[in-house]
Image (cartoon, rainbow, N blue to C red):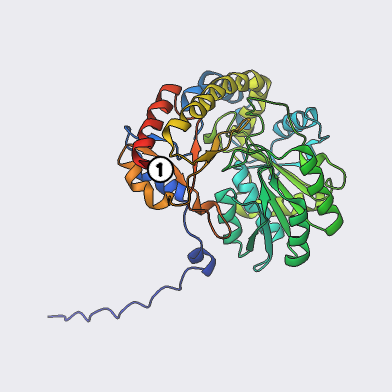
Amino acid sequence: MTVTEPAPPAAPVPPLAARALGVGGSPVRDILAVTARPEVINFAGGLPAPELFDRDGIAAAFQEVLAQSPAQALQYSTTEGEPALRAGLASRITAEGLPTGPDDLLVTTGSQQALSLLATALLEPGDTVLVESPCYLAALQVFGLAGARVVAVPGDADGVDPEALAEAVRRERPKLLYLVPTFQNPTGRTMPAPRREAIAAVAARQGLWIVEDDPYGELRYDGGRVPWIASFPGAGDRTVLLGSLSKVMAPGLRLGWLRAPAGLLRACAVAKQAADLHTPTVNQLAAARYLDVLDAHVEKVRAVYGERRDAMLAGLADALPEGASWTRPEGGMFLWVRLPETYDTTALLPKVVEQDVAYVPGAPFYAGDPDRSTLRLCFVTQTPQEIREGLRRLGRGLG
């Protein structure tokens, strides 16, 4: 009889990279997983309303592409992006006051990828990044994974304070400043033009990259358009502008873009080659065709989202405790609530979820010491009736 010797113990595999261990997952994604029950009214996610997707128009664009140019649509493409889409996007950006050619753009797999490419191209471990307070959560994740040191710049209701920025640049010697100036995530605030011009002047005078993230700019319900920072004197050679079709067309297509000076654009293209070669060809070609009708679709979306924003603003006073305050965004998807100091919105969330409603606690949006009395609400996903019911449930949970 043959005796089988026991297998020797396996050696442990090498550990994960320190940067992967040091950066947590997205609290928003975690909350969405917990609150996936259909009876939950979810103000937590930044999800466009699915009933407003132009299913017929998008399907027609795909059908036309596959019927007329299937070999091109199903083949590999250039890293920089399909020429037809870059030309269409460049035309739209130029029409909004920022002269742009197709070669100024890199098509990305969502604007989130653009952030990752910029981190790869610009940041060494230990470099300093300046951000708003509070700041878009997924940007904090990107910079954390890059090994950057993230420092919040003080500001006010108009965004980052230019004098505080100038002092932070002198003190911290950062590589870049990351901003969402229009309908900011999470607060919904918009930086006025004089503030943008002052920030451009600081960047020009003291040497600083500005990353201007604009995924929500076309979702304006009140007021007039504010020029991009990239259009102000001194900012043209040091501002990267990011945009997305996720909020105005469909997030499932994962289509974004990056506009940058030539040297940085090339470095981002090389980083993208290493990441995914290129953004899916068929999606790009379909989007290029859909741009012809995008403005009409966005008008419909704006009308609906504006009503939903108004419904949420109308119900907050009755839902929130005395002493609470909130932003009144002119557009976008979010508003920001500050409860009295005694409230901790992270600790309160389980109690609120028991009422079948959810929000995102404010603490994860801060690079520095968080304001634990804050929370973010998304107003675009639910109907006005659902918003009113959700606010009633929120009031019970906070009571």
Q: Based on the displayed image, in which of its 4 quarters is residue 190 positioned?
A: top right
Residue drawn at point x = 66 percent, y = 29 percent: 218
In the displayed structure image, the side of residue 65 where residue 195 appears, left or right = right
Q: Residues within 10 Å of mark 1 (few under 14, many from 20)?
A: some
Name the residue that disc number 1 marks: 32
Quadrant (top left, top right, bottom left, bottom right) of the C terminus: top left
**Where, quadrant-wise, is the N terminus in this rendering?**
bottom left
Which residue is at 55% across, 31% downward? 250
Residue 14 position, x and y percent, is 45, 73
Residue 64 visible at all: no
Task: Inspect the image, locate mark 1, and give the three-letter code of the amino acid beneath it.
Answer: Leu
Judging depth in this view, the residue of 209 and 43 nearest the camera is 43
Instruction: Kindly indicate the quadrant of the structure image that contains residue 84.
Output: top right
Is 302 situated above or below 398? above
Task: Name the spot of residue 61 as percent of width and height, x first.
Answer: 59, 22
In terms of secondary structure, where does tag 1 sit?
A: helix
Q: How many marks?
A: 1
